[in-house]
Amino acid sequence: MGLAQERDALDHGTEFGLITSNFAHMALESVAAGLIVIDLSGLIRYMNLAASQLLGRTLEQTRGLPWTECLHLIDESTRKAIPDLVGACLASGNPIELGVYALLVGASGAEIPVEGNVAPFCWLDDDVFGTVMVLRDVTPSRKLLRQRSAPTSPAIAPPDVAGHSNGV
């Protein structure tokens, strides 16, 4: 069965379409990055478990809501909101990178360092359905980066063999 027939099968609820749909759903839920599907109206249509954990909200709590009400991204250094990546992606028709110093402000107010992008979400015939936002929690690497760039304290020389300070 070709890709066009698979889309028709999904659209018409055939057995093959249901199997393919369930397989795709299981695959999306297994991805470690947060995946959020946003339609052309800016409404959340789907997000996987990783996205739900990042946002601190379930799909049921966010489905059908404007993404801007559920997802708050700020620049770590300026503390300003990151401009509308979804709108920029739809206007350009190209993927947009989130940036290196983005923070996701979760439902609890916790700030999570993230990297990711927003890309057009198209059907097989290239009709744009909306966007797919991919978010990865980069807390460990951002913490390591901060540690490496933090000023170090002056070195203290160990005592010499006789136990006297080297006076550094």
Image (cartoon, grey):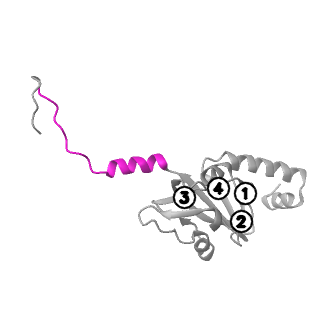
Q: Using a 10 Å C-alpha cutoff, classify the residue at mark 2 as few (fewer than 14 neighbours), some (14 to 19) or many (20 or more).
A: some
Dot 1 or dot 3: first in sequence order is 1
SS state under label 4: strand
Q: Residue at x 58, y 56 (%)?
A: 106
**Foreground tag (1 vs 3):** 1
In the image, which disc is placed on residue 70?
none
The residue that disc 3 covers is 104
SS state under label 3: strand
Q: Residue at x 62, y 55 (%)?
A: 55
The residue that disc 2 covers is 65
Dot 2 or dot 3: first in sequence order is 2
User: In the displayed structure, would residue 113 be above or below residue 93?
Assistant: above
User: Label 2 sits on what residue type?
Assistant: Leu
Dot 2 or dot 4: first in sequence order is 4
User: Label 4 sits on what residue type?
Assistant: Leu
| Residue 62 visible within the image | yes
Q: CA distance from mark 3 to mark 4?
A: 14 Å
Q: Using a 10 Å C-alpha cutoff, classify the residue at mark 3 as few (fewer than 14 neighbours), some (14 to 19) or many (20 or more).
A: many
Q: Quadrant of residue 59?
A: bottom right
Disc 1 + disc 3, Cβ < 8 Å: no
Q: CA distance from mark 2 to mark 4?
A: 16 Å
Q: Quadrant of the C terminus?
A: top left
Disc 2 + disc 4, Cβ < 8 Å: no
The residue that disc 1 covers is 61
Disc 1 + disc 2, Cβ < 8 Å: yes
Q: Position of residue 30 (x, y in %)?
A: 67, 45
- What segment carries the magenta color? 139-160
The residue that disc 4 covers is 35
Q: Position of residue 5 (x, y in %)?
A: 84, 59
Q: CA distance from mark 2 to mark 3?
A: 17 Å
User: Label 3 sits on what residue type?
Assistant: Leu
